[in-house]
Amino acid sequence: MAAQFGRRLCKGAATTAVAAVAVAALSASQAPGVNDHGRQPTADATPSPDASASDGSATGNSPYYTDLPPLNSPSPSPSTGPTPTPSGTSEAGIPATVLDAYKKAEAALRDSKPGCNLPWQLLAAIGRVESGQARGGRVTADGTTVSPILGPQLDGNGFALIKDTDNGAYDGNSNYDQAVGPMQFIPSTWAWAGRDGNGDGKKDPNNVYDAALAAGHYLCRNNWDLSDQNDLDRAILSYNNSREYLNLVMRWLEYYRKGTHEVPDGTGTLPDNRSDDGAGASPSPSTPSTPGAPAAGGSKPKPSPRPEKPSGGGTTTPPKPPTTPPDSPSAPPSTSPTPTDTVHHLEDAGTAKLTAMAGDAFTKRISTRAETKAGKAVAKVRIRFTIVGDTDTTFAGGESVATVATNSSGVAVAPALQAGERTGDVTVRATVVGRMVAGLDYTATVTERAADKLVRTGDAALTCVPGGEFANRVQVKATYQGAVADGVAATATLIKSADDPTVNDKGPYFKDADGKAVRTLTGLKTDAKGLLTLPRLYADDTTGTFLLRVDTEGGATLTVELTVAAAETSSPSPSASPSA
């Protein structure tokens, strides 16, 4: 089917109401595994991140397309010819570049987070609901949308209120944030969730490869396993915190799982209905900005329906569009403060000293308590933990941001930290999501990999003749608290004596790249098995007993004895005695 653009048309309240009812009823009845509960943290235990573990959602709960998938299966029908043809409807077709981006993101997550079990069909379902597969695949060869895809500005007028967080860098709006790109990330989420999916060195929310990979990582955070229905529900709800959204995405997920096919870029179908009824959406090349003007691609907007004549012969006036979103409650919102509104400050909740060697997991975790001005604990408040600065230390799972709800004691416990290879202090900042409260900084220290014990792996004597080469090489093994100590920095030095650790100026030596004698080696490291094999040793003309000392980070030291002696000569046989 040819591309269908220019169809985001405002519809009346009745149409929206019908669409909403259809989504709720049909989705609820057919979405497999959907339930009305999520996994809850145990009381006063380490709380699990809640269902919307970002700032409410990846999209800021922006509007989305509400079209349901067809009821007929999109599975390809058997064919006796050389090329099977899909029997499903055009809605099963996904533009080639967009489909490739979803599959590449799945492959990347399979390698980096195999326990997540992310199916590419979930990305396709979200991409369909959020942007109609990047407006039917209107993308360039590298996956960038032909024009930016922007949601309405989140100014609190029928939508969430999210003031500008990126100075308009992504959405061009320096007053309020707008969801951006084919996966509709809000700028504050993209700032930490953005990824480079096409290897061009940039993280662009308008690039479908970048956006798909970012969405995959977003859905896989918090150690969620998407093959588990509860975790899948929580992940989808964290993207857009709406039960109707969850049901709708599940419907498209199951539809795509039954089969799909590739269509050329720019020929995908664009949905008709939106959860906001089209209000507030930013104009785009696929949306006419002037009533009656033709849309891009030559499509014309649908004419307004004529008034129907009632049986009495008169005419009826079309209903006026509502001044508030159709799903807004009729009653005024409650003025009762939320738990978040009552938070006055954050306090440390007994966090121990945070130290780990490079490459190891931190054994202690950060604990933060939310309190009122009077010092009373506040439960059910989202605390965001952010690793700031230039570091490769992350939370378990590879993320630099995690959001956790406080438990009944007002305490949020951050996920375990995983030390990277860069040593030094790392700052982790705790802040309250949705409230301007001073953050609380924690310092985690990453130290060099260390060893507390060194031993030789062999016991062969290390001997050499003057001016010769030692036959055996020195190999040592490093351990730390009984475990293999890999990647530990070491230094090997030929010293004068046990009481004088200065470098000897005679006796055995190593050779540098130019063949010159050196008696100190730095920059050595143990291998994955904790082993360190030193280069070959040579002897000058000095005989005697010499010492080689190996030192490692952490204080482990081993002294090895080297002997340089002249070769033994055989004694002459006694001559025969002269005869008398």
Image: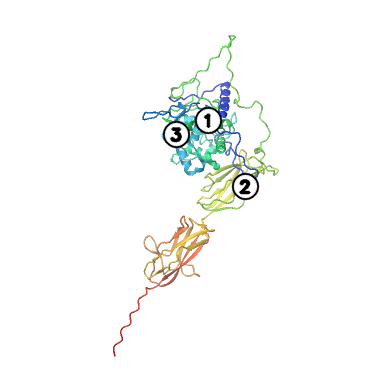
Give me the C-alpha separation between circle 1 and circle 2: 39 Å
Q: Of the residues shown, which amino acid type is indicated by label 3?
A: Leu
**Position of residue 294 measured from the top left corner of the image (x, y, whole percent):** 46, 21
Residue 509 seen from this side: yes
Query: In the depicted view, which residue is nearer to us: 200 or 477?
Result: 477
Q: Nearer the viewer, mark 3 or mark 1?
A: 1
Q: Of the residues shown, which amino acid type is indicated by label 1?
A: Arg
Assess disc 3: are there few (<14), some (14-19) or many (≥20) residues with their C-alpha within 10 Å of its C-alpha.
Answer: many
Query: Quadrant location of residue 97?
Result: top left
Q: In the structure shown, which secondary structural element does the residue marked by tag 2 occupy?
A: strand
Q: Is residue 316 left or right of residue 113?
A: right
Q: Which residue is mark 3?
A: 99
**Position of residue 488 measured from the top left corner of the image (x, y, whole percent):** 49, 57
Give me the residue at 50% from left, 18% from top. Answer: 303
Q: Which residue is mark 2?
A: 367
Tell me the quadrant of the picture where the C terminus can be found: bottom left
Q: Pointers 1 and 2 in contact (CB under 8 A)?
A: no
Q: Earlier in the sequence, mark 3 or mark 1?
A: 3
**Position of residue 259 measured from the top left corner of the image (x, y, whole percent):** 46, 31
Q: In the structure shown, which secondary structural element does the residue marked by tag 1 occupy?
A: helix
Q: Which residue is mark 1?
A: 251
Q: Nearer the viewer, mark 1 or mark 2?
A: 1
Q: In the structure shown, which secondary structural element does the residue marked by tag 3 occupy?
A: helix
Give me the C-alpha separation between circle 3 and circle 1: 18 Å
Residue sitting farthest toward the bottom: 580
Q: Earlier in the sequence, mark 2 or mark 3?
A: 3
Height in image: 163 above or below 525?
Answer: above
